[in-house]
Amino acid sequence: MANSTFDMSNQWLPFTPNRDFHRDPRVLVGAKGMHFQTHDGREIIDGVSSLWCVGAGHGRRQISEAIKQQLDTLDYSTAFQASNDKAFMAASAIAELAPGDLNKVFFCNSGSEAADTSLKMALAYHRARGEGHRTVLIGRERGYHGVGFGGMSVGGIPGNRKVYSGALLPRVDHMAFIHNQADFPFIQNEVPQWQTDPLVDLETRILPLHDPSNVAAIIVEPIAGSAGWYIPPQGYLKRLREICDKHGILLIFDEVITGFGRLGTAFGADYFGVVPDMLNFAKCVTNGVFPLGGVICRDHVYQTTMTGPDHAIEFAHGYTYSGHPAACAAALATMQIFREENLFARAGEMGPVLGDAMHSALRGLPNVIGIRSLGLAAAVELSGLPGLPGKRAYDIFLDCYHAGVMVRAAGENLVFAPPYIVESHHIDAMVSTLAAAIKRHA
Ligand SMILES: Cc1ncc(COP(=O)(O)O)c(C=O)c1O
């Protein structure tokens, strides 16, 4: 059913070319399972779990019922100097899912807030240990940690930093990017094994330059999601853990995309067998239906920070909506669905189906210079149009949308990351639509 009763003159759209959007609006008015309904009465396959959020598929009654019931019971309660039952229950459920002694959950509302929370937590931890001089933060080129000043500073996507470069945090450095286009343009459902060591530069240049004793934390995404699903080589995260341990540096995994099942395991930390000191989460924890994010930290980070007089706040940080009862009720219902339907394992099973389909349909098509798949996500990389970075991928995204498939354009990449309930026939439709669009834009 068509619905065009809205007026587009007031909303300034985030991370969207606004003027172009107004010429060709893409407005979603309904969703169920794997599909959206559009304002002009069409059905679109959600090939990206709506920004990597909707793992269990759209329209899950169990979650909306849990939210409704919560709103009728306790709609909101102050987050400071008191808390609510659902926040404690959600924290326990999340801690139980997390590996090792990642046991303490600090709630916020988004991935950006999780990034800034984890960076502040690292500074507070070192200060409590009497090492307040440890203020250097290290991220990675093309990393994405949201849009707050902290996350943006450790982030490494040039287009996100350019306009704000004069206002970024000082004492931040970046490790080299983890992609090896020359040797591994095509990665099919496996972690590549490089001959070279991408962490040499960290050990021999970046850390000596700042002196490791001044470094508070290193933050990475286990897989670079927003940049376009770039997979680190074998052993990379383990080595990073060792380097951090050697120098007393905290290791933060930003698992906003890899958390809650995308790789077939609860977290990327499980997939790669490495426990960070802090783990940031957001997307998928409530199946996208209510804003919630957080940082899970290891016991030692929490215990060390618990200093000062009993009546004094140990960590001067928090949000009005930290642990919102409705968000936490949504998280509990979402985790129950994940558990009951074994959806993480299903993501692990459907991942190779998506990966194989992408490789067999797209390899050899015009302008395709790489395909990378791991877990239930896959990206195809195209050579860009001269002088117009990102335009070819953006045009193909538009083309797919009009052909009934939502794919995500990220730089020169097109990325699929469907809900874990995806079936083979959806994957066939997604990949064949993308293949046809790539050919049309040759
Ligand atoms: C790894 C990572 N961190 C942080 C964020 C920011 O999350 P939000 O948009 O919820 O602030 C994202 C969003 O894509 C992300 O992928």
Image (cartoon, helix red, strand yellow):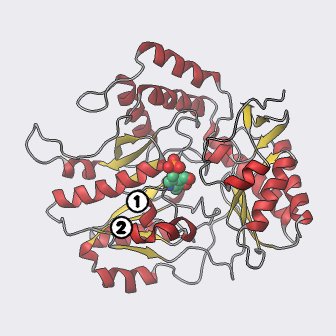
Using the image, determine if residue 368 lies above or below residue 209: above
Residue 238: name its quadrant. bottom left
Badge 2: how crowded within 10 Å, few (<14), some, or many (20+)? some
Q: Could you tell me which quadrant the N terminus lies in? A: top right
Kindly check if marks 1 and 2 are in contact, taking CB atoms under 8 A apart as contact.
yes
Residue 63: name its quadrant. top right
Q: Which mark is residue 149?
A: 1
Q: Could you tell me which quadrant the C terminus lies in? A: bottom right
Q: 152 or 262, which lies in front? A: 152
Name the spot of residue 320 as percent of width and height, x first.
35, 35
What residue appears at the point 41 percent right and 56 percent down from the top-left corner?
A: 275
| Residue that mark 2 sits on | 169
Q: Classify residue 131 as left or right of residue 155.
A: left
Using the image, determine if residue 293 lies above or below residue 139: above
Q: Classify residue 166 as left or right of residue 4.
A: left
Callout 2 amino acid = Leu
What residue appears at the point 85 percent right and 33 percent down from the top-left corner?
A: 41
Callout 1 amino acid = Phe
Q: Earlier in the sequence, mark 1 or mark 2?
A: 1
- Label 2: state its secondary structure: loop
Name the spot of residue 319 as percent of width and height, x first.
35, 40
Q: 405 or 420, which lies in front? A: 405
Badge 1: how crowded within 10 Å, few (<14), some, or many (20+)? some
What residue appears at the point 78 percent right and 50 percent down from the top-left corner?
A: 23
